[in-house]
Image (cartoon, rainbow, N blue to C red):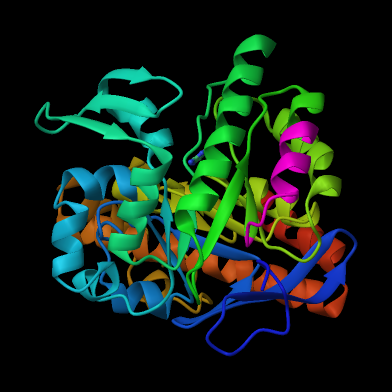
Amino acid sequence: MTAGSSNASPQAFAFRVLSRDGAARRGLVSTPRGEIRTPAFMPVGTAATVKAMFPQDVRATGADIVLGNVYHLMLRPGAERVAALGGLHDFMNWPHPILTDSGGFQVMSLAKLRKLDEQGVAFQSHIDGSRHLLTPERSMEIQRLLDSDIHMQLDECVRLPCTEQEAERAMRLSLRWAERSRKAFGDQTGKAIFGIVQGGETPALRVESARALAAMDFHGLAIGGLAVGEPQEVMLAMLETVMPHLPESKPRYLMGVGTPDDIVQSVARGVDMFDCVMPTRAGRHGLAYTRFGRVNLRNARHAGDPAPLDAESPCESARIYSRAYLHHLMKAGEILGMMLLTEINVAYYQQLMAGLRGAIEAGRLADFIGATKEGWARGEG
Ligand code: GUN
């Protein structure tokens, strides 16, 4: 059976579009470990933890899936060790779906002494200087050892701006690595592998990448190499270029994106899945995402404010703790401040996704986006 075919057994990986509003889609990814309601936001659990949150609290915010990273887990505690302990789901006590990123992107931003060639990328660990080689085949082996539900191909993402020659070289290398990744993944019932579109800011390269990947037997396609320093208009223009060349029947994942507004705009252009460190990282730095925009709890204006962040939030922590208390915790460097703000932010991102899904189902996405942006602009935060 080919990837993405719909008459699959209950144990197979499958995707169905349930409703549409313009280019936006409301869908359902089915995996043996559970369903993923799309458009979906995947909290980032880099090192087998969504930082500062208990897994059951991540689930309670409405997350159906989290993301893990090959790069971090291969270095510590090691993929073979995770496998010996029963796989990543048991290890981190998250029984629901997990997507793992393939490692190349993190090698380029974190590792020391990187050397990339046709074979793969050789690098030194940022933790202890140990030497490693990540090839498409080894990345697939690590993702299989981790036992993640969705594997990502190994790719090369270049920072923007870059020359067209550089974008073309990385895109072509990523296509060759896509073929090797797909072959090494083989046929694993209930699991999926996604290809990754590259091509920098050059529309013709993006189209070529998307068409070549669409012709390979992937279960879903990701758009990579965006939100890497370019303005939002460039990112949205690239999305509009790529979307018509991606198969309608497969999920589309925009990697590493983004702000709530990036997500809303991308959903309107047909993206189904997202991940980003923003809600978790911002929470650890005293920033809250709310219906009324972003709030910096470290600001002195909150020091005596008894009001909660959002009295009507479905997230209890956003309702019961005062801004004054959150301000105090952050100023005092208390761990609970980071925990509460991380939870509040992940919950807000999940509320936004639930709102988007409901609006697409009801055929009123434009109204929902208008009202959501009005809320952010009110700035009661
Ligand atoms: N995360 C954010 N962007 C990218 C990308 O282009 N490739 C990969 N593998 N991960 C990403």
* Residue farthest toward the left in the current orientation of the protein: 128
Front position in the image: 367 or 215: 215
Is 213 one of the magenta-colored residues? yes
Q: Main secondary structure of the magenta part?
A: helix
Which residue is depicted at the point 43% across and 34% down? 105
Residue drawn at x 78%, y 73% is 359
Percent across and percent down for residue 225 are 58, 33
Left or right: residue 144 versus residue 81 is right
Q: Is residue 196 above or below residue 364?
A: above
Q: Position of residue 276 (x, y in %)?
A: 48, 49
Identify the image quadrant of residue 367: bottom right
Residue 147 position, x and y percent, is 33, 67
> Image check: 341 left or right of 242?
left
Q: From where the camera sits, is residue 363 visible?
A: yes
Look at the image and give the residue range highlighted in magenta. 207-219
Question: Eyeballing the image, is 104 above or below 320?
Answer: above
Q: Nearer the viewer, residue 226 or 216?
A: 216
Residue 263, position as x, y percentages in the image: 65, 52
Q: How many marks?
A: 0
Q: Would you say 30 lies left or right of 213 here? A: left
Asked which quadrant contains residue 109, the reply is top left
In this image, 186 relative to 253: left or right? Answer: left
Q: Is residue 4 a member of the stretch shown in magenta?
A: no
Task: Point out the image quarter for the N terminus.
Answer: bottom right
At 69% across and 33% down in the image, what residue appears? 232
Q: Nearer the viewer, residue 361 or 239?
A: 239
Outermost residue on the bottom side: it is 10
**Residue 325 visible to the viewer:** no
The residue lying at 63 percent from left, 26 percent from top is 172
